[in-house]
Amino acid sequence: MTLTAALLATACFAGAAQADKLDDIISSGTLRCAVVLDFPPMGMRDDKNEPIGFDVDYCNDLAAALGVTAEIVETPFPRADSGADVGPCGCWRRLDLRHAGARENRWLLCAYFAFEMAVTANTSTGITSFEGMKGHTVGAVAGTYEAIALEEQVKAWGEGEFRPYQTQADVFLALSQGQLEATVSTSTVAQANVKTGNFPSIEVVGKAPFDIDYVALFARRDDYGLLNYLNLFVNQQVRTGAL
């Protein structure tokens, strides 16, 4: 997904002349991070309804390195995965490297995370593999890579039904209630939701043969100072073991 969060400066400057976005962030004193908060363990809420997770921690680390305050902005999956701007100042965020948004006015940094795709099924269906989903009712979060790929697969099979949902919580609730028979998600999301115990009668049954979901930060092509800083930050996170 999954910043691993989307990063958004709070200060926008009118007119043609603008300072580099890195300067804007530092002068504003706030780094706004758009995070999907139903994407455990990357983003979620604790029992006090506070944002937690890998994306949240990564945003806080970046804000600390910049000497500014982090602000978490909950962002729905379709907007986060599309590469669309989250606010009026433009954005840079974790991005699926296959997405067209990465090829337009944005420049990707070094990738730092990779997700495998997993199949989770309702235990009553007898589904034990990806191919076992053929002819069944399946679904995923609308707009995500896995939803697009799964819908295309259902069409290729020529039988079964695909249903889109707004959030991961909706998908796993529908799966546990039998409205869906199986879904495809990242392996981390699948395992995290099974382990919560909030969704009875579901289990991870295997891998989905979809492309690995590599993720990276991205920024506008012309924000050279920010691009250089973020590349340095990700490199240091990896070298020090923080990432």
Image (tube, grey):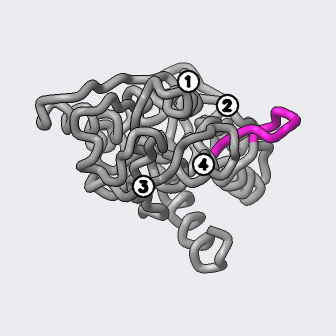
Residue 194: assigned label: 4
- Closer to the chain start, of discs 2 and 4, is 2
Residue named by callout 3: 205
Location of residue 237 by image quarter: bottom right
Q: Nearer the viewer, residue 243 or 165?
A: 165
Q: Amino acid at mark 4?
A: Val
Residue 73 is marked as 2
- Tag 1: residue type? Gly
Q: CA distance from mark 2 to mark 4?
A: 26 Å
- Of the two numbered discs 1 and 3 on the same chain, state the one appearing first in sequence: 1
Q: Which residues are magenta?
A: 43-51
Task: Give SS at disc 1.
Answer: loop
Which residue does the image show at 48% across and 55% down from the upper left? Answer: 187
Q: Earlier in the sequence, mark 3 or mark 4?
A: 4
Tell me how far mark 2 sits from mark 1, CA to CA.
10 Å
| Callout 1 crowding tier (Cα within 10 Å): few <14, some 14–19, many ≥20 | few
